[in-house]
């Protein structure tokens, strides 16, 4: 049996030191200028800009995007006191490996997906998770 598609993964495996969200925006299809849709659910895709709280993370690994398929824009938790970003956890995370051939040499890269976003330690999902809006 070959593994196909995204690989399920726990939030703590991807972000063992936690994560902070800077914002969320719709993902737009480059050619059509319309919202990009998730292939499986048909729902619009949203990108949450995330900073990895790992003090050892550097460069491109420090800032990533996590995609969420949802009918409406995911709602982020409140900002941390006096900080311009919000501590978050993602529900239903998955990693999708792919070959990035945009540089001089092809390399294996990955895309992060989630079903929803919430405040750390919160029970239940935020209102804008894909399951809640479907």
Image (cartoon, rainbow, N blue to C red):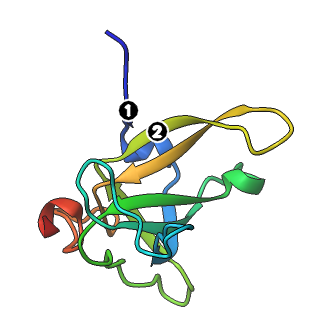
Mark 1, Cα crowd under 10 Å, few <14 / some 14-19 / many 20+, is few
The quarter of the image holding the N terminus is top left
- Quadrant of the snapshot with the C terminus: bottom left
Residue 107 image offset from top left, x and y in percent: 72, 32
Which residue is the site of mark 2? 96
CB under 8 Å between discs 1 and 2? yes
Query: Element type at marker 2?
Result: strand
Say if 91 sits above or below 46 in the image. Answer: above
Looking at the image, residue 132 lies above or below residue 12: below
Residue 68 image position (x, y, % from top left): 36, 61
Mark 2 is surrounded, within 10 Å at the Cα level, by few (under 14), some (14 to 19) or many (20 or more) other residues, namely some
User: Which residue occupies 77% across, 55% down?
Assistant: 59
**Image position of 50 (left or right of 42):** right
**Residue most extreme to the front:** 32
Q: Nearer the viewer, residue 63 or 52?
A: 63
Residue, x 37% and y 32% (percent of image)?
Answer: 5
Q: Is residue 85 above or below residue 9?
A: below
Nearer the N terminus, badge 1 or badge 2?
A: 1
Where residue 45 sits: x, y (%)? 38, 65
The residue pinned by badge 1 equals 5
Query: On the image, which quarter does residue 90 sit in?
Result: bottom left
Between residue 101 and residue 111, name the one nearer to us: 101
The one nearer the camera, 120 or 110, is 110
- Distance from label 1 to label 2 (Cα)? 6 Å
């Amino acid at each position: 049996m070959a593994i196909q598609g995204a690989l399920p993964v726990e939030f703590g495996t991807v972000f063992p030191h936690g994560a902070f969200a800077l914002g969320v925006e719709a993902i737009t299809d480059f050619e059509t200028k319309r919202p990009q849709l998730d292939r499986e659910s048909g729902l619009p895709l949203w990108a949450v800009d995330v900073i990895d709280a790992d003090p050892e993370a550097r460069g491109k690994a420090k800032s990533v995007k996590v995609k969420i398929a949802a009918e409406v824009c995911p709602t982020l938790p409140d900002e941390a006191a006096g900080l311009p970003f919000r501590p978050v956890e993602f529900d239903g995370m998955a990693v999708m490996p792919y070959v990035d051939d945009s540089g001089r040499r092809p390399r294996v890269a990955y895309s992060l997906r989630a079903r929803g976003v919430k405040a750390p330690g919160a029970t239940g999902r935020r209102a804008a998770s894909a399951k809640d809006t479907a």
